Amino acid sequence: MAQFTIDKLDEVRIRKPEDIVRAAKALADIAAAEGMKAAPAHDIADKRTPVDMEGNVLASTVFGWPDTDDVWWRNPRIALESPITSACRFENEPFWVNAEGFHLPSPNKYLESIDLSNFEARARTRAAIVVPVHMAFGQIGAVSFDFDDPEKVDLTEDFARNGDKFGIYARAFIESYTRVMGAIQALPPGSRLSKREVECLRWAAIGKTDMEISMIMSRSRATVRFHIHNASTKLNAVNRSQTVFKAAQLGYISLN
């Protein structure tokens, strides 16, 4: 494994909105030193990409991607169509990918099942080193590192040399960007669930009704509804399904 330093870690971290452009330039320089361009996404479920304080798209103004009508961050279906975004849902370590498959130190059976047909058109690249960034509340970001040379499709040596380094810098940039630019909290403060609330939600997660849960827990139906309602209020959820989902995001319950 290649040796590297992380002396630029503070440079890619964002502590206030005024730091965004400076940090983006630092990440762009790290990629450029290896002949690559970075493509950042703070939320793969959202076609929007990181912006500066004035709302300018960093992919264009800092990272050097051409601002054309068919550019990747204007494609509303890329979150569903791209095999790269699909892979980021099932892997949290850096990997590299081309039309022949996903390449990473440890096998991942979920990545092996992803459709790679028409790869270049769907992924908008011929090959890339990708860093998934899994964050609080279930949000997934990613940074893709692509070579300026479109003919380079075997990134084995490049990944061995830069995969871990890119992983550290990309995570620091995306995580700090999300924290600074998250104007609206995903959950309100003081959202800790009680033991009874968690127990009710665990049964609700596998499809049990309030009546069934009341029988299992030897509590009244009204008590079960009270606990689930309290959990919903604490998690700022609009219905039972979202309450269960948010509880799972926070690790209170499992959906497996």
Image: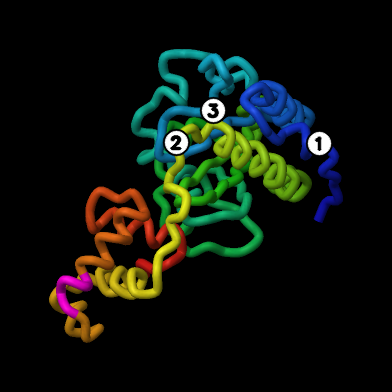
- Residue 187 location (% of width, % of height): 42, 48
Q: Nearer the viewer, residue 212 or 226?
A: 226
Q: Name the amino acid, label 3.
A: Pro
- Residue 17 location (% of width, % of height): 62, 25
- Residue 106 location (% of width, % of height): 62, 64
Question: On screen, 197 above or below 112?
Answer: below
Horizontal side of residue 131 vs 214, given as left or right: right
Label 3 near label 2: C-beta < 8 Å?
no
Crowding at label 2, few (<14), some or many (≥20) Cα neighbours within 10 Å? few
Q: Which residue is mark 3?
A: 50
Crowding at label 3, few (<14), some or many (≥20) Cα neighbours within 10 Å? many
On residue 8, which mark appears?
A: 1
Residue at mark 3 to residue at mark 1: CA–CA distance: 20 Å
Residue at left offset 25%, top offset 57%: 241
Crowding at label 1, few (<14), some or many (≥20) Cα neighbours within 10 Å? few
Horizontal side of residue 195 vs 161, given as left or right: left
Q: Which residue is mark 2?
A: 184
Residue at mark 2 to residue at mark 1: CA–CA distance: 29 Å
What is the span of residues highlighted in magenta in the rendered image? Answer: 220-224
Q: Nearer the viewer, residue 82 or 52?
A: 52
Callout 3: SS: loop
Between disc 2 and disc 3, whose residue precedes? 3
- Residue 73 location (% of width, % of height): 46, 26
Callout 2: SS: loop
Residue at left offset 32%, top offset 61%: 231
Q: Name the amino acid, label 1.
A: Lys
Quadrant containing the N terminus in the rendered view: bottom right
Residue at mark 2 to residue at mark 3: CA–CA distance: 16 Å
